[in-house]
Image (cartoon, grey):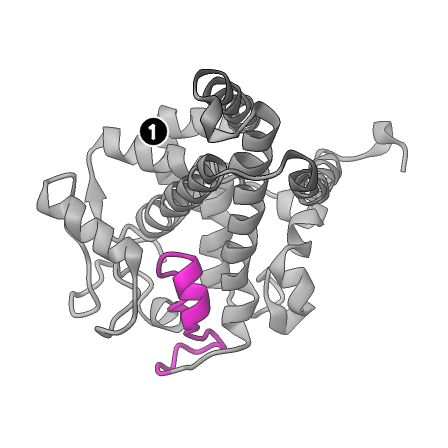
Amino acid sequence: MPTALMTTAQRQARIVKASMIGGHFACLGALFTGVSASALWVAFTMYVVRAFGVTAGFHRLLAHGGYQVGRGMRFLLTLLGSLAIQGGPLWWVSHHRNHHRYTETDRDIHSPVQRGFWYSHMGWMWDPACFEGSATNVKELHKYPEIKALQRHYPALILGQAVGMYLLGWWLGSAYPQTGTSGPQMLVWGFFISTVALWHATFMVNSVCHIWGSRPHDAGDDSTNNWIVATLTLGEGWHNNHHKYAYSARHGLRWWQLDVTWLTLRALSAIGLVRGLRLPRQRQPAAAPA
């Protein structure tokens, strides 16, 4: 289809598809740049920090109101989630709320029950349908101009990270040549490999955690608990628990269910940076977003 005849949603889907495919191929650059301890540490740090932004910021705070924070902390967590390159905050939260509202019906755009594993994993983000319609279910977030700014400037955040990783590698290689790193190496590991790994870990919650795993709760759908996904996503893999108690800030409800996001939120609560952590034993206020 000629570009001039495309709808905005079709153009967005084409850009996302090209970017994600390109990101995967860019990871092959490691064959030419090699690897260093510095690059691995930066890649791991970027993975964990941005994963926490998605789980604690986008998901448990913005989408479900699982706890309360001050405005500065809300912005920081939303910024970290935006850096994960999984869509802007308003777009991400809107789709996730629709997932809970329409789970595994034909209106759940990333349901493996409806469209199969691959589509639910990442193919849905290449479909113009996921960019159509207005996000009317996130109206309360529009009162925060800083969150709207993160949505509006989302492409700049992607470019800024790539440039930042390159400059970090260049500086380390110049100032500390013993690290054995370089701009291209840090770009490949700190940006591309870290991002692609986090993509697949997060997307497994949509795909794997509606097919394989245990279902200790009757959540009215096929959501599962999967310890492998939970490990990779800082606790999001306890998905059946989450579908049963969507408002809970804690997803790993048993002592042996590792939930790094919950443990970190507990630590932040102890020093006063977050408050009002909600748990299943608490009554869910009627006004809380589902």
Who's the residue at 17% across and 44% down the image? Answer: 268
Figure check: 30 above or below 206: above
Task: Give x and y (percent) for residue 166.
Answer: 55, 23
**Amino acid type of the residue tagged 1 in the rendering:** Tyr
Residue 275 in view of the camera:
no
Q: Nearer the viewer, residue 207 or 23?
A: 23
Who's the residue at 30% across and 62% down the image? Answer: 259
Figure check: 36 above or below 275: above
Q: Quadrant of the N terminus?
A: top right
Q: Main secondary structure of the magenta part?
A: loop
Q: In which quarter of the image is the C terminus?
A: bottom left
Q: Which quarter of the picture shows residue 16?
A: top right
Q: Which quarter of the picture shows residue 182?
A: top right
Q: Does the magenta stretch include residue 221?
A: yes
228 sits left or right of 234 in the view: right
Who's the residue at 71% across and 33% down the image? Answer: 8
Figure check: 206 above or below 24: below
Give the residues in magenta: 216-239
Kindly identify which residue carries mark 1: 144
